Every structure is written in C-alpha cells, then in structure tokens.
Image (spheres, rainbow, N blue to C red):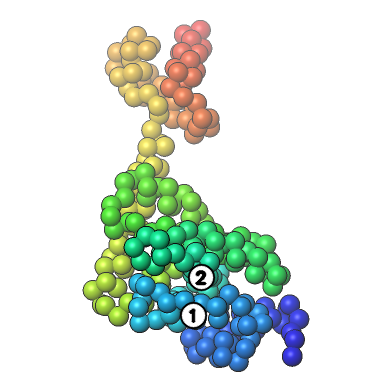
Amino acid sequence: MTHTVEEQRELLDAALMADDVADALWRFVDCGFADEIVPELPALRLEQDPIHRHKDVLAHTIAVIAQTPPVHVVRLGALFHDVGKPATRSFEHGGVTFRHHEAVGAKMARSRMRALAYPPETVRDVVELVRLSGRFKGYADGWSDAAVRRFARDAGHLLGHLNALVRSDCTTRNPKKRMELQHHVDELEARIAELAEADRIAAERPLLDGEAVMELLGVGPGPVIGQALAFLLDLKRSEPDLDAAQTEVRLRAWWADRAG
C-alpha cells in the first residue's frame, strides 16, 4: 500500500512522538514504513559506528531519539543527526571517519522533510539542529569565551533544543563517560548564562567613564559628571552603534547646549 505524503508524515510523527518511542521506531522500520517514508533511516543499519561499537548507527540513532525530551523538533533532529554518515565514511585517516557528516546530513534532512511537506519553519529548525549537532564535540578540549559565545549565537533560539540533543547523543554503556558529558553540557550552559549576564552589564555602561568625561569637558568632580554619564547611557541605549569618537562628539554637543 502506498501512502499519501500527508499519511507518510503522520506515520513518521506518530512513531517519533510515541510514549515508547524506541519500540514504535523499531516497528516502523521492521514493517517497512521506514523504507517508504524515510529510507535514510534503515540505510543506517549497515553502518557500524566506530565510537558506539556495540551498536550500528541505526540502533544508536533510535537510542538517541528515545533519550530526547518529547519535543517534535528535537526528535526530528535526533532522527536525522547521523544520516550523513554512510555518504561520508572514509578509511583514509587511520580508521573509520565520517568527516563533515553533519553538513551532509543537514542537506539530506532538508530534502527528505521537504518531500514530506513539513512546514518551512520546522524544516529550517531541524536542518540547523543537524548541522550544529557535532559542534559540541570539541568542548572538552577547552573553549575560549569567544567560542562559547559563538556556539550560543549560532544556535540562537534553538540553543535549548541543541543542548538537549547533545545530551541525548550519548549511548555509551560507560557511566563515567555519560556523567562527564552531562557535566560538560552543564558547564557550557552555565558559561553561556554567565557571559550573557556579563554582556548585558557591559551594554549598560557608557563608552566613556567619569574620568574620561572630566578630561574631555575640562571639569572636576561634581553633579554634572553624573548628569553627563546619564546622558551617555541613554545615548548608548538609543544608538548602540556609535563608537567612542562619535560618542565624544555628541557629548561635546550636549555640553555646549548646556553652556548655551
């Protein structure tokens, strides 16, 4: 029996959002629905994962999905996060590698989801989750604050979903490794929050401090300095793209108006 596109999408979503998602997905594969609806999934059965040696990539993928929260976009991201591995498998670097499989998988996810007529915003979000799904792997080697900011900026509104996928993408039987990964994600989330707060505070400071204002205006300490700093803070909030030189020009104009 051939299903319509709408029926195919509904069958896939029903399996992905089932209470026992692992059982539902294995039945989805074993009964042949996956071959018809998302053939990229059963294609993973033949691909041995060198990291999770006890599982092929299909078993790993279903295990990852089963560990995700019941959020549609996250489960779709988990479904497609490794589909690029068969196309990128290489033995050229002293073992099996799947270099850039996330980028390839993102393109495959976009093509399959469009064929299943998913809403454009869902396609966009899932493709981004797949594309970014491997970005966290280097965190344990040490990330600078700039790298942490870049990770959060690139993830954007998907940051929470991306971190949920990263947490779920750990199916090792080694409890120590599982705890280490969860610890690293906890640490990353804490750093993102701390840096966001620091950036917020920095954004609330005028570009010139009190000493710079006194030197620029040629005045000493007094109430006028507080007034000048208040003016500069309002200026930064209303015109955040002004640089220090432009800010000095505006401060001089403000001071001239007061003198006038």
Mark 1 near mark 2, Cβ–Cβ under 8 Å?
A: yes
Q: Position of residue 79 (x, y in %)?
A: 53, 74
Q: In the image, what residue occupies the spot 63% across and 64% down? A: 110
Left/right placement of residue 251 relative to residue 24 reads: left
Give the number of the disc on residue 46.
1
Q: Position of residue 82 (x, y in %)?
A: 49, 69
Residue 222 visible in image: no
**Disc on the earlier residue, 1 or 2:** 1
| Front-most of residues 191 and 10 | 10
Residue 211 is left or right of residue 113, and the answer is left
Of the pair 125 and 218, the residue shown nearer to us: 125
Q: Is residue 235 above or below residue 251?
A: below
Question: Taking 4 as reference, is 124 left or right?
Answer: left
Q: Looking at numbered disc 1 in the image, what kind of residue is underneath it?
A: Leu
Picture residue at 32% right of the left edge, 22% below the top: 210
Q: Which mark is residue 86?
A: 2
What is the secondary structure assignment of the residue under circle 1?
A: helix
Q: Relative to 101, is 192 on the left or the right?
A: left
The location of residue 131, given as percent across then percent down, is: 51, 59
The quarter of the rendered structure image containing the N terminus is bottom right
Q: Residue at x 59, y 61 (%)?
A: 107
Question: Can you say whether 185 is above or below 34 in the image?
Answer: above
Which element carries disc 2, helix, strand or loop? helix
Residue 171's label in the rendered image is none
Is residue 208 visible to the viewer in this orientation of the structure? Answer: yes
Q: Residues within 10 Å of mark 1 (few under 14, many from 20)?
A: few
Query: Where does residue 86 sit, x and y in percent of width and height?
Result: 51, 70
The structure residue drawn at horizontal position 58% and vertical position 75%, both measured from the top left corner, is 40
Amino acid type shown at disc 2: Pro
Mark-to-mark CA distance, 1 and 2: 9 Å
Q: Based on the displayed image, in which of its 4 quarters is residue 190 positioned?
A: bottom left
